[in-house]
Amino acid sequence: MSANQETGSSSSLLEVRNLSVEFPMRRELLRVVDDVSFTVQRGEILGIVGESGAGKSMTGSAIIGLIDPPGRIATGEIIFDGESVGQHAEQLRGKRIGMVFQDPLTSLNPLRKVGDQIIETIRTHLAVSASDAHKRMQAAMEEVGLDPTRAKAYPHEFSGGMRQRAVIALALCAEPALIIADEPTTALDVSIQAQVLDLLKRVCKDRGASVMLITHDMGVISETTDRVAVLYQGKLVEVGQTRDIIERPQHPYTEALIACTPTIEGGSFGRDLAQIDRSEGHGAKGEFYVREAQDSQSTETVTNTATANTTPFLVAEGLSREFDLSDPWLVRMLSFRRKKILHAVSDVSFQIERGTTYALVGESGSGKSTIARMAVGLLAPSSGTVTIDGVNLNDNELGTEARQALRRRIQMVFQSPYASLNPRWRVGNILSEPLRAFGLAKGFETDRVVELLEQVGLAATDAKRFPHEFSGGQRQRISIARALASEPEFIICDEPTSALDVSVQAQVLNLLKQLQRDLGLTYLFITHDLAVVATMASHIGVLQSGNLVEEGKCEDLFANAKSDYTRMLIDSAPRL
Amino acid sequence: MFATVIRRLGQSIVVLAIVALIAFLIFRYVGDPVENLLGQEATVADRIELRERLGLDNPWYEQYTDFVVRALQFDFGISYRTGLPVSDMIAHRLPATLELAFVSATFALVLGVVLGIYTAIHRQGWLAQLILSTSLIGVSLPTFLIGILLIWIFAVELGWLPSFGRGDTVEIGWWSTGLLSASGLKSLVLPTITLGLFQMTLIMRLVRAEMLEVLRQDYIRFARARGLSDRVVNFGHALKNTLVPVITIAGLQLGGIVAFAIVTETVFQWPGVGLMFINAVYFVDIPVMSAYLLLVGLVFVVINLIVDLSYLVIDPRIRDGINRGNTGG
Amino acid sequence: MKRFFASDFFYDFCRSPVTVVSFMVMMLLLLSAIFASFIAPTNPFDPASLNLMNGFTPPMTPNEFTGNTFWLGTDDQGRDLFSAILYGLRVSLFVGFSAVLLAMLIGISLGLIAGYIGGWIDAAIMRIADIQVTFPSILIAMLIFGVTRGLLPPDQRDELAIFVLIISIGLSEWVQFARTVRGATLVEKEKEYVAAAKLMGLGRAQIMRRHILPNVLGPVLVIATITLAIAIIAEATLSFLGVGAPPTQPSLGTLINIGQDYLFSGEWWILLFPALTLLTLALSVNLFGDWLRDTLNPRLK
């Protein structure tokens, strides 16, 4: 069953009817949620999925009445357990509806002990004695997998996953009937994410509570929810049983969303993804069309000159990097602490063939970003070498000119679309800076800038604009254009799509593959997302805490992972 | 944590030493001590004798140590202007300033914090807006103008309160206090308001800004989402987190009271060390200036130390060595 | 230019009548000060133009001896108060602006260097800042003033007083700029566009100047406005105490000092008008600075 609207019955726990949320802005009235209706049944897990701007977080906030002004609920009704909520949202908060936010670090008061915060919530809603509350607190902590003896700890002493468990404990401790979880695992590593989602599923099934899970990740939806509602730009596009929607999506957007999502499943290696191309105009809403996935040409080595070069393009040999995090010596002496050395990267060696894409995969703290920076020359290794086409990057004998010539051949595309472009510079300047720095295109810089813009799918007039006028995906394209300006042979992509919506990610990844085919580029692709690796790379190396635990060709590794860690990563990745 | 305490103490001592060095340099090298003490009529023999007695030809580090040692014994030399020992002058006038400063600081702190919290919680209320607008005037009015205005209204026109002096004081040992007499208390009112008003408005606006900032944080939102009442959220969660940064700046601002006391004492002819200092600057009375510098330096360093250490008590992140300071040191 | 008028910033500005008024008042005072010599009917500091018989004339009343009328009255020396205020305003604003500029120059440079280069330079600069901030700026200004006076021969003290004043106030206010700029620099230098610039082989100075500096100047504007108000009040206070602008080149503070003596004997106008001018100046700057801070802070909405 998939319908655009859903009518509730009296047995629904939560019923949302024609909800609209507006934000009066200076020039216009922004409708972030537009006439949305759905229900949450008792004991089920409902997913709300959509990309950024879909209005999913707003819907969650509207239900418990926590919309920040000037936003307001324009129309609609929210009916909880048969009663209209209206202005009484505060009474439901915590007691009948619990909430879990995305960022566990900022969700907890840093100055109060974790146990105290739980006890406080318990005593606010349940009339129990102090000692009773204490016992309940310990029970709550155990239930989420935390050690109750750590109740006297402060939030900063917990890891991210543990903090999120504490947040879940806080949401559950007053025994609500519904939990609204707003992107609860987006900020966590994939292995922790799997654990937290399992936890959520388990405690809710145990208590018979319902969950409204808000996320952008189709894989999470597939593995966790019973039913799902799909939002696109504030409107409800489709709703129904999860398996039905994923296997037989009715609405074109849902279909496109699923097609865009990279997967690990066999047969998808090297294929371009489907794309959702928005119509012209920056940040235009509404119309879109779907470009079907195509079989790309083989991602094997593309040699286009007579030199059948069999030597690898990049050779990393015994790379290591330590960071000294010790306190100043005086402090150490007086508090008898030892030196704190962080071994970010330990003895990593790999090779990249020309024209291929090598993916480095790892969770946070695995050292992949550090390796990226060593490979490009931003950071010197503590030991080991990086050799690019025979030249050692960190050779102190290199003269300025030679070094600059080497820099020309290596460029980088960064993770954050917001921080990688100087907000005060026009795009034209951003793109012409490398031309000036390397002394290229003298005399016809403007033309070259236009050429670069068109190469990444932007317009010549975009050169006059500032970065903030562009969307995230467009900014990444500008970043890519900047990287191409010096006509490099090797580009390091450091999580270039982690901050982008799934459909935008598809566009950018397709662009990168296109450029590789056209220009014969070699890529080092850093990511934490195995599904993206399956789409992009021919070879893969798996990093754990600074060590390279496994590497090989993609198809081989995915089919037959040898190390436990790799297997764990593959299993934890949510799939459709 | 012990290590942090030791480190802070060490820093304070270093700062004091530097302050002492500056005071010493001013004392010794600005103007000519011999000239000032003997006047122009003195003979050459007299000058040489004085130079020797004061040790003015010794190496500078010896003179510096000498200076510090004597300072620790409260010997600050002789005033060029009055010929009296500086330490006597200070001892005589210190109680006046300290009493004034203390009462003003309490006034500024208590009222400032209370009003700051009120205006933060009731952001849109008309009373809050009124208080805010008036506070802007408080910040724009220089201390001396407030003093003059108050004198004009309350002393000259209305005749309720005295316009200068301390009133009757009671001697308790070395200390003289004005708190124990009616006229003493009355004399204290206007200067206290003058001195405290500026600080109060500053503290109030600071507390308000910090609290508003804290109320924006995710954990406050989450606390509301858990159903905690507004009162609990405001006072149980927001308040403590607000106080942490407020403490530093409030501490430093209160140091400002000691400085602005100079102005207040001038306007009200209050016989404190501030007035003494101004006269010293005007008459280029170097020993008094340098002694005042040392004294004030000590006060500020101690205030800073207390503020830093109180951070340790309140913010557990700092206790564990996670550095949140501005200085990165 | 057109973009500015269409921007959100300008829009917010126009929507707040208080801010518009305070801005206009500021401009009015500023222009009066700049063009004082053209606007003022007399030059009150030219001894030749003074007539002692004009002294103590109430505002808008003809003098009993000479028959001259002065808008705001005259002081004990027969100086036209209106002119005196205009010239005093000029001194106050000159000192205020110059001091802020000096503080900005020192503070921004040191903050940028400390933030970007880090290491022992950062530690040293921040130590000095910490020590200085332990002491209130008024005190430091007084101290620098007192010491400089001690070092200068007596006859030059008055002449150079203005510059000593500027230096002492400027030197006492740089820390706030330095700290803010350093904080912003620390944030910006981790951003990826800086890494991109390094990959192009740009040197440290180039990166600091071209990339980081434009992005850290935002909060500086707010601080500058607020520091201006502080500097004006500091200067007035110092002059009032007699350790600032001398009577030969009086600022508003000096005028108030003079006026204080005559307040209780009935010539209230000698005090009131300079005081009102000072208050209006400080208030308008503060109001504008306040609004600026609220608008430019994206989170306080």
Image: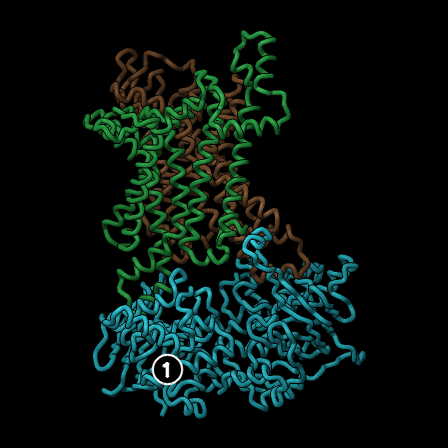
Chain colours: A cyan, B green, C brown
**Judging from the image, what secondary structure is the residue with disc 1 in?**
helix
Q: Residue A123: horizontal and vertical position, in percent?
A: 27, 69
- Which residue is pictured at 33% across the width and 34% down the height? B195
Left or right of A221? Residue A378 is: right
Q: Relative to B246, say whether A514 is above or below.
A: below
Q: Relative to C82, say whether C110 is above or below.
A: below
Q: Relative to A570, say whether C254 is above or below.
A: above
Left or right of A419? Residue C24 is: left
Q: Residue A404: horizontal and vertical position, in percent?
A: 73, 60
Q: Relative to A239, say whether C234 is above or below.
A: above
- Which residue is pictured at 34% across the width and 69% down the height? A118
- Residue A413 image-quadrant placement: bottom right
Left or right of A561? Residue B164 is: left
Q: Residue B285: horizontal and vertical position, in percent?
A: 47, 21
- Residue B30 image-quadrant placement: top right
Res C31 seen here: no
Query: Which sits in the foreground, B305 or A46?
Result: B305
Residue labelled with disc 1: A203
- Residue A115 image-quadrant placement: bottom left
Res C99 seen here: yes
Which chain's residue wears label 1?
A: A
Query: Which sits in the foreground, A269 or A134?
Result: A134
Quadrant containing the N terminus of chain A in the rendered view:
bottom left
- Which residue is pictured at 69% across the width and 75% down the height? A522
Residue type at the position of mark 1: Val
Q: Residue A206: horizontal and vertical position, in percent?
A: 35, 85
